Amino acid sequence: MKKRILIVDDSFYMRTMLKNMLTDAGYEVVGEAPNGQTALQLARETNPDLITLDVILPDNTGLDVLKGIKKEQPDMKVIIVSAVGQEVIVNEAVENGAYSYIVKPFSEEKVLETVGNALKE
C-alpha cells in the first residue's frame, strides 16, 4: 500500500513541486493545505502517514500547527520544510516532535531521503 502524505505550504508553487516529487516517487498525496486551519482539519480527515509542514503560514505558525497535530495524533510523522533556517526555530520544531527539518531551497534527493527514512521507522 502506498504511503500517504499531506502537504502544508502557503505557496501553491511549493505544494505543486512537492506533490509532483512525492507522487513521482510512488507516494500518495492525500491533501494539500495552504494554511494551518486547513492543515489540522485535513490531518484529522485523511490521517496521513506523514505531513510536510511549512513554518510560515498565513493564519498560524507551522510550530503551532505542529503542536496541534502532535496533541491530536502524537505518533504522526511531521517533516518541516521551510525557508526559515534559524537554529532556534529548528530546535523548537524538533523539541515539539518534528521528525526532521529541511531548509528551502532543497534538493529532491534530500526530500525523498528524509521522507523515506521517516516512513521506514
Image (cartoon, rainbow, N blue to C red):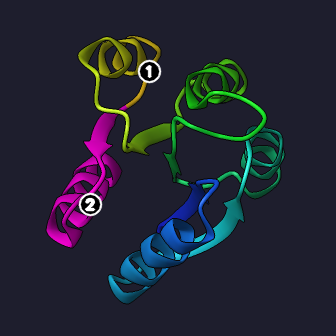
Which residue appears at 83% of the width and 40% of the height? 37
The answer to whether residue 99 is left or right of residue 38 is left
| Residue 19 in sight | yes
Q: Is residue 116 above or below residue 28?
A: above
Q: Secondary structure at mark 2?
A: helix
Q: Which mark is residue 111?
A: 2
Question: What is the three-letter code of the residue carrying label 1?
Answer: Gly
Q: Which mark is residue 97?
A: 1
- Answer whether labels 2 and 1 touch (C-beta < 8 Å): no
How many badges with numbers are in the image? 2
Depth-wise, is mark 2 or mark 1 nearer the camera?
A: 2
Give the image location of residue 7, x and y in percent: 57, 59
Q: Secondary structure at mark 1?
A: loop
Q: Is residue 24 above or below residue 120?
A: below
Which residue appears at 41% of the width and 21% of the height? 93
The answer to whether residue 24 is left or right of residue 38 is left
The answer to which image quadrant residue 79 occupies is top left
| Residue 1 in sight | no
The answer to which image quadrant residue 69 occupies is top right
Q: Which residues are magenta?
A: 99-121
Q: Could you give the CA–CA distance between mark 2 and mark 1, rounded to whole angstroms? A: 18 Å
Circle 1 packing at 10 Å, graded few (<14), some (14-19), many (20+), is some
Going from N to C along the chain, the mark reached first, 2 or 1, is: 1
Residue furthest out toward the bottom: 24
The answer to whether residue 102 is left or right of residue 2 is left
Which residue appears at 47% of the width and 14% of the height? 96
Question: What is the three-letter code of the residue carrying label 2?
Answer: Val
Instruction: Give the position of the C terminus as an image quadrant.
Output: top left
Give the image location of residue 119, x and y in percent: 34, 53
